[in-house]
Amino acid sequence: MSIDRRQFLKAAGATGLLGLLGSPLFKVLAPGELEASPELKEGMAKSAKRWAMVVDMKAFPTEESYNKCIEACNKTHNIPQMESEKHEIKWIWAEKYENAFPDSYNGYLTESIEKMKFLVLCNNCDNPPCVRVCPTKATFKREDGLVVMDYHRCIGCRFCMAACPYGARSFNWRDPRPFIKNINPSYPTRTKGVVEKCNFCADRLYRGELPACVEASNGALIFGDLKDENSNVRKTLRSKFTITRKPDLGTFPGVYYVIGGS
């Protein structure tokens, strides 16, 4: 379903997606068109003090179950399927435990965990090193914890990719558009020479929707406000033991993992 152009422009202003408007799918902004939006304040947009996600790996019984999340993300955000692995664009993908949690790996993991693939994505960190190193402020952190991109400002220096300890950013070495099988008209494509990554579906939150991967996860991905004691995220963190990726680095990820227990 396509969205109204004016709605998208306002969402872009709110989510840092301004750079996407360079896509041929969208016209250039008219002067004054991106003023503060009353609809943004009074509409259906989901809001939070600090967005966070819990990945409950026990709720992914099969490879097919987490592939649904990856496919939903790829389809929603026009993520190209590149021919070469070195050109690959990834917003959410699967990794072995030893790659996802290298600082807590040991050679005697249970067989189930050793065989398990963990969904990984941008952690939308509290202390994101990618933001500190970006010379043009193309990537920045919002007050609600989302780390987003303004692609118009991205000069392709890839400092952010070097700074991210999770490998959560991809660079468009090639024009991605020929490698998108079916373009989703409600989300712009990107261009060659810019970095991109997961943004917790900031555009969908604006429309009052959950992230695409969360919708496709059948409850395995739990999304909500970390600062709200009654949110599903907080309830899960209170009731289950969770870990984060590379906690010693001090980035304070916004993605938590349930990997075992009852």
Image: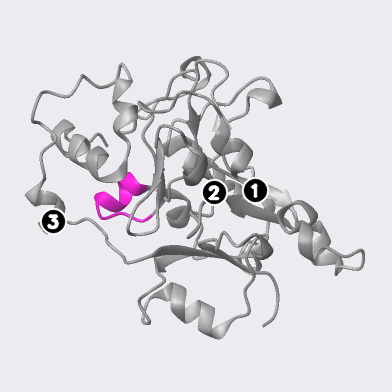
Q: State the quadrant of the C terminus.
A: bottom right
Instruction: Please indicate whether residue 45 sits to the left or right of residue 183 in the image.
Output: left
- Quadrant in which the N terminus appears: top left
Q: Earlier in the sequence, mark 1 or mark 2?
A: 2
- The answer to whether any part of residue 72 appears in the image is no
Instruction: Identify whether 262 is placed above or below 176.
Output: below
SS at mark 1? loop
In the picture of the structure, the residue carrying the numbered disc 2 is 129
The amino acid type found where label 1 is placed reads Pro
Disc 3: CA contacts within 10 A as few (<14), some (14-19) or many (>=20): few
Relative image position of residue 32 (x, y in whole percent):
8, 30
Asked whether 257 or 152 is in front, the reply is 152
* Disc 1 versus disc 3: nearer the observer: 1
Left or right: where does residue 134 sit relative to residue 2?
right
Residue 203 on the magenta segment: yes
Q: Amino acid at mark 2?
A: Pro
- Decide: few, some or many residues near mark 2? Use Cα within 10 Å; few <14, some 14-19, many ≥20: some
Please say if the residues under marks 1 and 3 sit with CB atoms less than 8 Å apart: no
Q: What x and y, as percent, mark residue 53? A: 48, 63
Q: Secondary structure under badge 3?
A: helix
Give the foreground label among 1 and 2: 2
3 or 2: tag closer to the N-terminus: 3
Q: Is residue 254 left or right of residue 105?
A: left
Query: What residue is disc 3 on?
Result: 41
Residue beneath disc 1: 165
Of circles 3 and 2, the one toward us is: 2
Q: Which residues are magenta?
A: 202-210
Q: 90 or 58: which is nearer to us? A: 90
- For the residues labelled 1 and 3, the Cα–Cα distance comes to 35 Å
In the rendered image, is residue 246 in sight? yes
- CB atoms at circles 1 and 2 under 8 Å apart? yes
Q: Label 1 vs label 2: CA separation?
A: 8 Å
